[in-house]
Amino acid sequence: MDSTPSTPAHKLFAELWLFIAEDLLEEENGSRDVQSMTLVNRYLKDVMQPLLFHSVKLHVLLDFADDGTLVRHFHATRFIPLFMERLDFVTSARIAPRIQYVEVGSYSWKWDSRIERHDGVDAQVLIHALLDKLPSFVNLARVLLQQIPLDTHCLERLSRVQTLTELSIIACWLRIKTFPTDDPAFRLRKLYLRVDSSDVEDYDNPWLAKLISCETEEIDVTKDNVTRTLLSALSTMSTHLRSLRILLFHDVATRHPDFHRLLANCPALKELRLTQSGSEPDVVQPIPAGYVPLLHTITGPWHIVKVYAQHPSVRQLPHIVTDHHNFLPRVESIHAIRPELTHLGISVFNSLHDINAIRFALVHFRSLKSFTITAYTVLKMVLDDVCLHVTQFDTD
């Protein structure tokens, strides 16, 4: 005999209720409406509640000494049972398939009357507990790890997530005796790696290159040592970065002997972004003919941009840094190199005194679709001249 309670809600198939809930979630306050519907009866709760859960976040605390030295990563003891209860809930068979994003981060802790000074559990216990449960999230796609300690156990658990496509490791402290020996089970599309200067040597390991595959579309690494490590490791691997579209490296890459070899393996690269280190080598070698045929955007130090802009497919230079004195000469130089530009951005780090460079750009770059200027200060007289000239330009 069927013991399922008969309610008006049961007269509609579960698939139809799911369709209604998913449609509601597209609205501004949709999650609140769906949550209200889960309170109507057990049937709607079972059908709709999983839709409300798509991420798991763990925030641990940082405790610093008076001199700014990091003392510990921790969390209040009373938090542990609440966290473990929630972890059991999100890893249940009903909820876990909906989880697509995991975030583990930390923030500074200031004395709170609810937390005793000597209270707390080592954050590594909580981090291990969460990462040990990653296999439960069969559709997990994105992981963010920020300002937390990572040991070998953490990297091994992370490496086994086959569905992972985006990994961000931001200013984490590596406490690793040995890096994992096996290749990661995932094939990342996006890799973001941010390293504090004090910890950069900890990341100097070829294992990091194993995070990159032929399916990787975006690499974002800005520290010089890590850039060198990745370049050296990638040059010895057979990985063909056929899907790479966006590459952000420290500008030391342009002085690395394997950089052009890397570009030769990136036929789909569209954006090359290089950090501003302040150092200028004597010679910057141009990108060889036939390499990165789809490259259209370059950002970086002027001494590199002016050389790489000679690449025939480049059409966007969205961030060129200059002072007012060099504003016009650099715009003229860009026009001589690449008059077909469609997007140009100039950042003037001191005052903008006249509109000569702006006038030149508007008149001579005939294909320009976007022209952005930022400056520390702009005189009102100059601003009025800019508005007047742009108005006249549009009228003409």
Image (cartoon, rainbow, N blue to C red):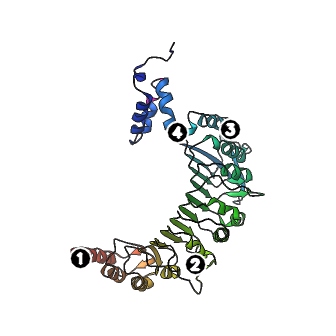
268 vs 33: above or below: below
Marks 4/1 in contact by CB < 8 Å: the verdict is no
- Identify the residue under disc 4: 53
Q: Secondary structure at mark 1?
A: helix
- Identify the residue under disc 1: 392
Q: Closer to the N terminus: mark 2 or mark 1?
A: 2
Marks 4/2 in contact by CB < 8 Å: the verdict is no
Question: Which residue type carries mark 1?
Answer: Gln
Q: Position of residue 14 (x, y in %)?
A: 44, 29
Q: Report, in whole angstroms, how far the alpha carbon at label 2 lies from the one at label 1.
A: 39 Å
Marks 2/1 in contact by CB < 8 Å: the verdict is no
Marks 4/3 in contact by CB < 8 Å: the verdict is no
Q: Closer to the N terminus: mark 4 or mark 3?
A: 4
Q: Position of residue 379 (x, y in %)?
A: 36, 76
Q: Can residue 253 be seen here?
A: no
Residue farthest toward the left in the current orientation of the protein: 395
Q: Closer to the N terminus: mark 4 or mark 1?
A: 4
